[in-house]
Each structure stands twice: as structure tokens, then as C-alpha cells.
Amino acid sequence: MKRLTCLTTAALVGATGPALAQDDRVVVGFATAESGFMQAYDKPAQDAAMIRIKEINEAGGLLGKQIEVVNADTKTDRAEGAKAGLTVIDEGADLVVVSCDYDFGAPAALAAESQGLVSFFLCAESIKAGIQGVGPHSFSASVLAAVQGATMAQWAYEKKGARNFYRLLDTWTEYNKGICDGFDWAMPQLSEAKLVGEDTFKNEDASIAAQITRIKSLPEEPDAIMLCTMMPGAVSAIKQIRAAGINSMILNGSAVDGSYWLSAVPDLSNFFVPVQGSVYGDDPNADVTTFNAKYKETTGGDPSTQYTYPGYVMIDVWAKAVERAGTTEAGAVVAELEKMNEEPTLFGPRTFTPELHHQNKARYLIVETTGGKPAVVDEWTIAEPIPVAELMK
């Protein structure tokens, strides 16, 4: 197990349980993926979190104490995730940070919940990554997948004139289902929109030839395909759709943001995703560009995906709640988090309530990939928050 902050031998010997940590230390425990495919999501967000922790420490710390960090690798494995959660709890974590996906982060979050500790998913976007799937001490730093699906449906309809949509769901994770749930919520509100077909596949499927055949058998090509998927299978699905000669707009959630995979689909065009901030140097918010430069200076590389940003947000809002509560005690911190209404952050406002520890409305930038090059082309905010009852269907 690797530690990102050096702890004295005495501190390690004394840290026999979470209760001991509260009086003289402030500890953030990362039970996240240092190996396996989830590392591609977790590491950028964790690096961003470390930047915010460093900023807080350099400004005098939290409650007058330096934030210490402990770390355990989940290895992108659910069983290992539970062990990692227990490891950082045993080392005195006041905040347990877990993986950037509900399915892979939940075991560590549940371990924290069982001890009455606050947990934050780095960037999970299922409603289950919070009260509904873990418990009252659990939060996510990102925006619900359903908001992404609703955003893309509304934007494509209003700004690109899309009327005929095809829905293609990868059933692998709750995140994927959430994208399509948001799309489903938005569609009835678009008066002239029509769902001309729908299908499913699994992330590990080597071929989606049957699904492509059904798309090609339609009387005419759909204006847009709502593709609800994530890495690693997203690349194969997108490549096959384009190789089959289907030129429809492809809409997806934020999980396929980033240029790191685009060489596998040369000259990809007419492809759109929503992002909280741009990693391409064209974000309209100059502060995001400044952060990107700081990230590169710190890590040696540019942010690879918009999932970098929620890690910074997570530490920011948690630290504000701790300062306002005057303690790291979980109940008091949760109460302060739940008071946050449009709380300003570098990557957009955050609102938490006793009913929802997630974001059900947000401003998104729209990134279009043309000729293999992604760039911000627009922004969109859904007309109203998605009701919790809809999110729970």
C-alpha cells in the first residue's frame, strides 16, 4: 500500500481506528484504483484532489491542521475495494474517497457508511452513489449521468435539429443506464422528437453487428444515436458504427471525453459529449485554463478527461463544510454539505440536500469531435432539474 503523505511511525502505531483520528489529525483516505481500467478515471480526479489539498495546506490547513493522506489500491475489483476502504478507515480517515463509478466505488463507500464516516465518490454519476445506494453520509462530486443524457437529447433537438433518435444502451453499469434514463426523461418533452428504435449490448461484446444491422434496416438513418456506454467497450462500439457506414450524430455521456482513445477511430466526426470543463485548452472559463496549467506543472501531463475536475470540487466542498462545522465529525459535516445551494466551485455550482447528495441539473459544455479533433462548440443547461422520483425508476 502506498501513502501519498508521509506519516510518522508514532502516528501509524496510534491510528488503530477512525475514532482516534478526530481530535488531532485530519486525514483523507483514498480507496481508489491504482491499477486496472478504473485507474484511467480515478487517477486524474485524485491528482486534482491532491492539488486542492496542497492549496489548503499551504494556506494554513483545515481547522488549523495539515491534511494528511493515506491511500489503498482497489485494483478495479469490488472485493479489493471493500478491503481498501477498511484499510484507510483503520488508518484514521475522516473522509473516505472512493472510485469514480458506483459499481466499483460502492464497496469502499459502504465500509465508510458502516463506520458512520463521510464518503465521496470521485466522480460517480449514478444516483446510487449517495443516499440512495450507500447511505446518508455518502456523496458524489460529479453530475448525474441522467443529466448528461437529458442534456444531449435537448441540445441535439434544439441546436442540431435532430428529430429521429435511436437509443443504444450498454447494460454493463448503473452509469450507462443513467445516461439512457435521462434521455428517456427528456424525450417526451421534445414535441417533434421520435424514438425510431432501441437496442442493448454489453460492454465486453466483441461485436455489435446484430444491433448495427437493425439500425441499417430502418427506412432512413436516424438523426442521432444516443449511445449510453463507457470505456473500455465504447471504443469498439463507436468504431463499428462508423465502419458500417452509419453517419448519424453519435451522442454519449461524459465517460468518453478525452482524446486519448481517438487514434482507434481515425477521423471520427459528428460525435458529441457533455463536459463540466474542457481539457482541450478552449474552456470559456479562464480559471479552468489556469487550473489545467497547474495540473500539468504538478503531474507532468495535461488533464486527460473532464473527470479530472470533480476531484478538485470534492475536496473543495468537503473542506468548506468542515470549516463551517468546526469539526470533521461526520454528522456535522453532512449537515453543512446539505445546506449548500449553488455553492460556487471552479467547475460550476454544487447543491446538496437531505434528499439528494448529487447534482440533478448542471451547465454542460458540448464538445464535438470533427476529423478526430475535439473542441467545445456550445453549452447547455437542462430546463429543469430531473426529479428524484424519475431518477429512481
Image: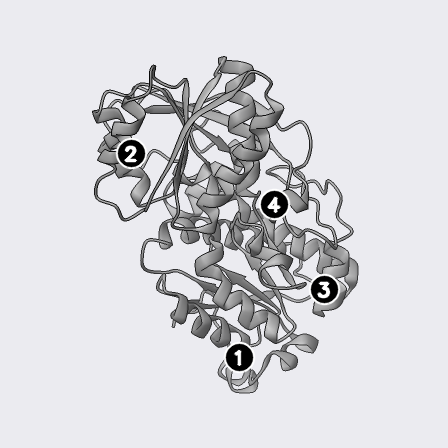
Mark 4 element type: helix
Image x and y of residue 182, in percent:
55, 37
Q: Which residue has dot 1 on it?
A: 90
Amino acid under disc 1: Asp
* Inter-mark Cα distance, 2 to 1: 48 Å
Residue shown at 63% from the left, 70% from the top: 117
Q: Pointer 1: residues within 10 angstroms few (<14), some, or many (20+)?
A: some
Amino acid under disc 2: Gln
Q: Nearer the viewer, residue 256 or 328?
A: 256
Q: Which residue has dot 4 on it?
A: 391
Amino acid under disc 3: Leu
Mark 3 element type: loop
Q: Nearer the viewer, residue 185 or 42?
A: 185
Question: Position of 21 compared to 326: left or right?
Answer: left
Question: Position of 226 compared to 323: left or right?
Answer: left
The nearer-to-camera label among 2 and 1 is 2
Mark number displayed over residue 211: 2
Q: Which residue has dot 3 on it?
A: 63
Q: Pointer 3: residues within 10 angstroms few (<14), some, or many (20+)?
A: some
Q: Pointer 4: residues within 10 angstroms few (<14), some, or many (20+)?
A: some
Asked if residue 311 is positioned above or below residue 4 in the image, the reply reads: above
* Inter-mark Cα distance, 4 to 1: 34 Å
Residue shown at 63% from the left, 43% from the top: 390
Which quadrant would residue 166 be assigned to in this image? top left
N-terminal of the pair, mark 4 or mark 1, is: 1
Mark 1 element type: helix
Asked if residue 247 is positioned above or below residue 187 in the image, the reply reads: above
